[in-house]
Image: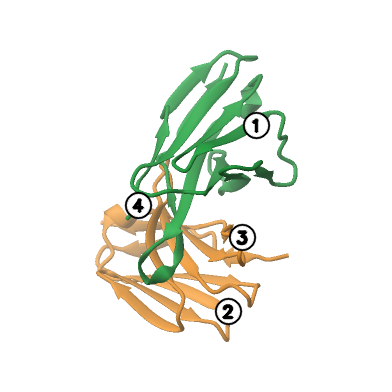
Chain colours: A orange, B green
Amino acid sequence: QKEVEQNSGPLSVPEGAIASLNCTYSDRGSQSFFWYRQYSGKSPELIMSIYSNGDKEDGRFTAQLNKASQYVSLLIRDSQPSDSATYLCAAHAGNNRKLIWGLGTSLGVNP
Amino acid sequence: GAVVSQHPSRVICKSGTSVKIECRSLDFQATTMFWYRQFPKQSLMLMATSNEGSKATYEQGVEKDKFLINHASLTLSTLTVTSAHPEDSSFYICSAPTLASGNTDTQYFGPGTRLTVL
């Protein structure tokens, strides 16, 4: 069974610190990976996608992909209280356009 | 990014009634849309894949006669919860995939519909 695993947390970091969120996936056929942020009571919003090995940066966010280790991570620099949310990792499930979802990591940024 | 809307955002109904939820892709065409359900403090659960021009594909354990899906056009999918009961109270979210920059098929979510069945 194809799976995506995340540490459920909660992860707590002080304001201004780097938050590191990690995700592993089981299907070596997955080619694209996504990080979504979900605030309580709201729907998920896309933060970043990544499909090439290495780092991809967008503002305060950096996604990292290591296909050999089947590992995806998200770094949030200069964490702000507004970053407090649940972060969902997802992987494409092949050619049917579905995503395989992790259960999410809850992040709290303390002022 | 692409924009997906949902209507209504919130609905309260009596047990036994049916509720229709609409999902629209506003600035792109979506031959496929996904319907999710999320209970409080739980993860997303994929209910079904909505396909324009053909029948929806339901995930294991989801009753297709209870959750009717119609993909009426390239920009509209509807989910009807038939004979709703209190246990159907949940947050229903749709998403639509489209090719984003770099040709990565990316899902964009609607804002969700909170259903409360009394």
> Quadrant location of the C terminus of chain A?
bottom left
Lower position in the chain sequence, tag 4 or tag 1 = 4
What is the chain letter for disc 1? B
Q: Amino acid at mark 3?
A: Asn
Where's residue A36, x and y in %?
Answer: 43, 58
Which element carries disc 4, helix, strand or loop?
loop
Mark 4 residue type: Ala
Type of the residue with mark 1: Phe
Mark 2: few/some/many CA within 10 Å (<14, 14-19, 20+):
some
| Chain on which label 3 sits | A
Mark 2 or mark 3, which has the lower sequence index?
A: 2
Q: Identify the mark at residue A83; answer none if there is no mark.
A: none
Q: Which residue is mark 2?
A: A70
For mark 1, give the secondary structure.
strand
Image x and y of residue B88, in percent: 62, 28
Callout 4: few (<14), some (14-19), or many (20+) C-alpha neighbours within 10 Å? some
Q: Residue at x 42, y 38 (%)?
A: B24
Tell me the subunit letter for badge 4. B
Q: Give me the C-alpha separation between circle 3 and circle 1.
A: 21 Å
Q: Quadrant of the N terminus of chain A?
A: bottom right
How packed mark 1 is, by other alpha carbons closer than 10 Å (few <14, some 14-19, many 20 or more), is: many
**To which residue does mark 3 refer?**
A96
Mark nearest the camera among 4 and 2 is: 4
Q: Position of residue B8 (x, y in %)?
A: 42, 27
Mark 4 to mark 1 CA distance (whole Å): 26 Å
In depth, the one of B85 and A80 nearer the eye is B85
Q: Nearer the viewer, residue B46 or B73?
A: B73
Q: Pointer 1: what residue?
A: B67
Q: Nearer the viewer, residue A5 or A65?
A: A65
Locate residue A55: give its quadrant: bottom left
